[in-house]
Image (cartoon, rainbow, N blue to C red):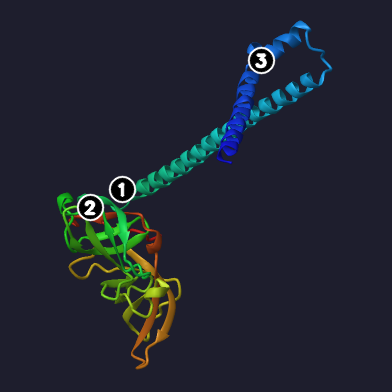
Amino acid sequence: MKRKVFLTIVVFLAFLFSIVATVISLKNYDSNIVSKKLKEGYVPTNSQIVKIIRDIREYINGIFHLNQIIAENKRLKEELNKLNSDKITIEEIKSENAKLKELLGLKDQIKLSASYEIARVVQRSQEAWLNYFIIDKGEKNGVKKNMVVINNQGLIGYIIDTGKNWAKVITVLDPDFSASAMIVRTREIGVVRGSVNLLSKRLCELRYISKDSKVKLNDIVITSGMGEIFPKGIAIGKVVQIKNDKFELTKNIVIKPLVDIENVEYVMVLKQLKDINLSVGVK
């Protein structure tokens, strides 16, 4: 019984080997003996053998042709993906260059005779509040605590902590942020502060404005220059809501920052404020 099984396996392997050998030989038409005989006229062209050989040859050629098509398709897809990737990279570089040019243009706009540092945002607060972020410049670049951070739209915040190669920026949205501010049209002075209640809405508030104030919606609010951190003239935001407080003594004013805090990528850190003339973001 075992001998029969063994012989069956041997016969099957021999048969399989003969098929493989035939296929390989048919791959090279010129070296195939049968093909040569066909050429020389020894085998009738309409014989069953010729038809079978032709069918097998066409099938094999079809397989090789299909493999070529698949390989070409893969290559073209890879080239297309690379082109798309290159296109995205080019667009990103153009966008970054435009933003950097805007920041560098600030030097002429604010007549800055003092030094500054251009930095990139590398990390944002883990919460969704955007109340602070980390930049890629720090102590080795001369960046220190309480330095003002701006872009071409206006005030972003100021430095509250530093490391050798990084600095933490608190934004105008943070509840701990405060800055003396002025309503441009009415010249009234108040204080801009972040608010826990407004944080998720990307808004902050202007406090200590008299209930008799003539403030209006869309009035622009800027830094007043009073205090030790912020120079005068940096745009903070515009008025989007006005209410009297519950004691009817002052107005509760909500402002929307002019800076798109959520999409800030590059910032300017003002390292020195001597002889600075600011009107950032004020139209």
The residue singled out by tag 1 in the image is 108
Q: Is residue 86 left or right of residue 205?
A: right
> Looking at the image, is 79 positioned above or below residue 208?
above
In the rendered image, which quarter is residue 152 located in?
bottom left
Q: What amino acid type is highlighted by mark number 3?
A: Tyr
Question: Front-most of 87 and 269?
Answer: 87
Q: Earlier in the sequence, mark 1 or mark 2?
A: 1
Is 185 or 24 nearer to us in this picture?
Answer: 24
Instruction: Give the residue at mark 2.
Output: 137
Amino acid at circle 2: Lys
Mark 3 lies on a secondary structure that is helix
Q: Mark 3 = which residue?
A: 29
Residue 279: percent from left, percent from top: 32, 59
Which residue is at a point 73% across and 21% down the rendered structure image? 53
Mark closer to the observer (1, 2): 2
Give how far apart the Cα atoms at labels 1 and 2 are: 22 Å
Q: How many residues crowd mark 1 within 10 Å: few (<14), some (14–19), many (20+)?
A: few
Q: Position of residue 204 (x, y in %)?
A: 36, 74
Question: Is label 2 in a helix, a strand or a loop?
Answer: loop
Give the residue drawn at x 30%, y 55%.
Answer: 122
Residue 75 visible to the viewer: yes
Q: Nearer the viewer, mark 1 or mark 3?
A: 3
The reply to whether residue 260 is in sight is no
Whole-percent x, y for residue 248 in the image? 36, 92
**Residue ID at (43%, 47%):** 95
The tag earlier along the polypeptide, 2 or 3, is 3
Residue 10 locus on image (x, y percent): 58, 31
Residue 59: which numbered mark, if any?
none
